[in-house]
Amino acid sequence: MASPVLIPYDENVQQNLIDPCIKGTLNVLNSCVKATVKHFVLTSSCSSIRYRDDVQEVCPLNESHWTDLEYCKRYKLWYAYAKTIAEREAWRIAKENGMDLVVVNPSFVVGPLLAPQPTSTLLLILSIVKGMKGEYPNTTVGFVHINDVVAAHLLAMEDPKASGRLICSSTVAHWSQIIEMLRAKYPSYPYENE
């Protein structure tokens, strides 16, 4: 097992995001190794693909691309940082143990919540809708409905031809377009304007 990844300047991020993501993935995979599981489907994220200095030169990105960890550190993209390390470790463990691993890399997941706690996706959208950040990201983002993510996982598990990394995404929109769509449906919120 790789040595723990420590981000010394933000203990909260380390304890509440990075450690659970990486350790959780490693714990599940190591349990699968002990139980001699031969086929495993992992949920990762497009965040483990898209953050890199050369993104404009290599677009469109595909499953062969990986997020640059130094880029994540520079811009404090801790979710992408953790997901990238966790996925790389999963590939290492699978290779070392002869496990067939398929990774689903969903983009920004939308739809009904499956858990009682709000997801990082929901918290980001709420902060933009409520005007809490001071600005919205000047980027485009891919979205995918949770039902499509579930279907991708089922296919990855049941189809013997499924292999490697599988990007799961649908519509791509700029945050300004997303805000306008939400504002039309929910006009009483303050929203980010910058």
Image: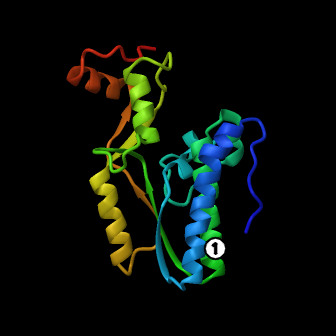
Residue 160 vs residue 56: left or right?
Answer: left
The amino acid marked with disc number 1 is Ile
x 51%, y 46%: residue? 59
Helix, strand or loop under label 1: helix
x 42%, y 24%: residue? 128
Q: Residue 139 appears at what percent x and percent y?
A: 47, 30
Q: Is residue 55 above or below residue 3?
A: above
Q: Residue furthest front?
A: 116
Q: Quadrant of the N terminus?
A: bottom right
Residue linked to disc 1: 93
Asked where in the image residue 111 lies, by quadrant, the reply is top left
x 29%, y 63%: residue? 151
Q: Residue 8 appears at what percent x and percent y?
A: 78, 40
Residue 43 vs residue 93: left or right?
Answer: left
Which of the pair 169/185 is nearer the observer? 185
Report crowding for label 1: few under 14, some 14 to 19, many 20 or more residues within 10 A (C-alpha).
some
